[in-house]
Image: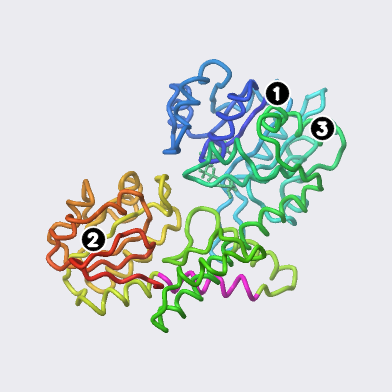
Amino acid sequence: MHITVIGSGYVGTTIAACFADLGHEVTAIDIDEAIVETINDGQAPIDEPGLEELLETHAGDRLTATTSYDPIPESDITFLAIGTPSNEDGSIDLTALEAAAEATGEALADKRDRHLVVIKSTVTPPSITDDLVPAIERGANNPNVSVGMNPEFLREGSAVEDFTHPDKLVVGTTEAWATDRLKDVFEPLLEAHPAPVVETDPETAAMIKYANNAFLASKISLVNDLGNICKEFGLDAYEVMDAIGLDDRISEQFLRSGVGWGGSCFPKDVNAITAAAKAAGYDPAVFEAAVEVNDRQPERLLTLLEAHVDLEDARIAVLGLAFKPRTDDIRNSRAIPVINGLQRRGAEIVAYDPVASESMSTEFPEIEYAESADAALTNADGTVVVTDWDEFATLDDEFQTMANPIVVDGRRIVEPTDDIIYEGLTW
Ligand code: NAD
């Protein structure tokens, strides 16, 4: 099949490269010329395991990137993978996606064969009918064009692996030919790695994505709440969670308490579904509590540190800046409120991350960035661990270069020894 993917960010580049690897002809479109050039050079515009290898193999062959919408009518199906950030009130900001949807409609004005426009971006159910279908129709009200929803469940840090080994495929369409076309795209993938296919309408498909993310974010907040209680009682939350994870109804996944969830999806998606629910007249109390618990965790980390060191003018090492390991994405990383909290207390900050320092330096140009964990720890008066990068698990002698070997661990990654003063966030 010939596929167009609009938006070449974390999702768009990953799915474009994976579709090409499945044997499809792919055109990737982005308004950012630098991204387009990088993809055409066979390089990854983002740091994601396995992505560069796929682009090296397929760029210039089955995968071409461009800033032009002109190639859209030559394709059979278009995926819209544009960012859907939050407005200030938490509601979904559709500005970029709506513009892309309208331009896609315009490009398809004269299309005589059937064409399916699939929303890959995460959007609230009402916005499909109220905003996106009308935007495409403003571009062109062409009866050959149908609109579907195919939410994406990949996780940054394992995006290629997740996309190629899905737990489920959600196909939200309004016409039988559209269902078939969307399933055809994934046929080679499902042959190699069978997964259940959920066939539904676009709005339900959109809700499935929010239900998935809001459930997982709330689960982590519940686990963090329980972890905080364990800490107050002097108990090890991980021992408690290991035990409850044996219950099939709970499952062992997502039971690691810590400094909280971040990233480009959980915070904005929980806020967006909360705002959309409120607009519809319902107050989702559990989601609001999940956000509140999440917002508290970075402060709890700093309170633990403060119990050991006066933070005014103290040199504090922040280990980990990415919102999770194996990505350079810092969007809504817990490192941001941790650094803000340290700055408010007058601390001098030296930060280290294996790949995310450059991204964070645009957010915090005034702090020091070290080249290694070892360099960050040297002469530090304390350290906080914010991201569970594997390399932090093997730190040992490096802590002895600190002025005070105080380690407050937000992710239970450091191996405590008798030579350091170690505080776990919830254990
Ligand atoms: P992103 O910000 O990384 O990428 C969006 C891209 O769209 C950017 O490269 C931008 O230049 C481009 N763009 C903006 N306007 C455009 C236009 N008019 N035409 C062409 N390109 C345009 O976003 P992302 O993280 O890839 O997320 C995309 C969507 O997928 C969001 O709705 C997000 O919620 C959802 N999602 C993200 C993830 C994730 O892990 N990042 C996972 C599942 C779902």
Residue 101: which quarter of the image?
A: top right
Badge 3 crowding class, 10 Å Cα cut-off, few under 14, some 14 to 19, many 20 or more, is few
Q: Looking at this view, is 22 or 330 the one in front? A: 22
First of labels 3, 1 by sequence position = 1
Residue type of the residue flagged with mark 1:
Ser
Give the residue at x 45% y 23%.
42
Label 1 sits on residue = 75
Q: Looking at this view, is 255 or 303 the one in front? A: 255
Residue 243 position (above or below residue 375): below
Give the residue at x 34% y 66%.
338
Label 2 sits on residue = 317
Is the Cβ of the residue at disc 3 closer than 8 Å to that at disc 2?
no
The mark found on residue 180 in the picture is 3
Residue type of the residue flagged with mark 3:
Asp
Q: Secondary structure at mark 1?
A: loop
Q: Secondary structure at mark 3?
A: helix
The segment highlighted magenta reads: 285-297
Label 1 residue near ligand 1, CB within 8 Å: no
Residue 91 falls inside the magenta stretch: no
Look at the magenta stretch and give its main secondary structure: helix
Q: Assign the C terminus to one quadrant of the image.
A: bottom left
Residue 184 position (above or below residue 161): above
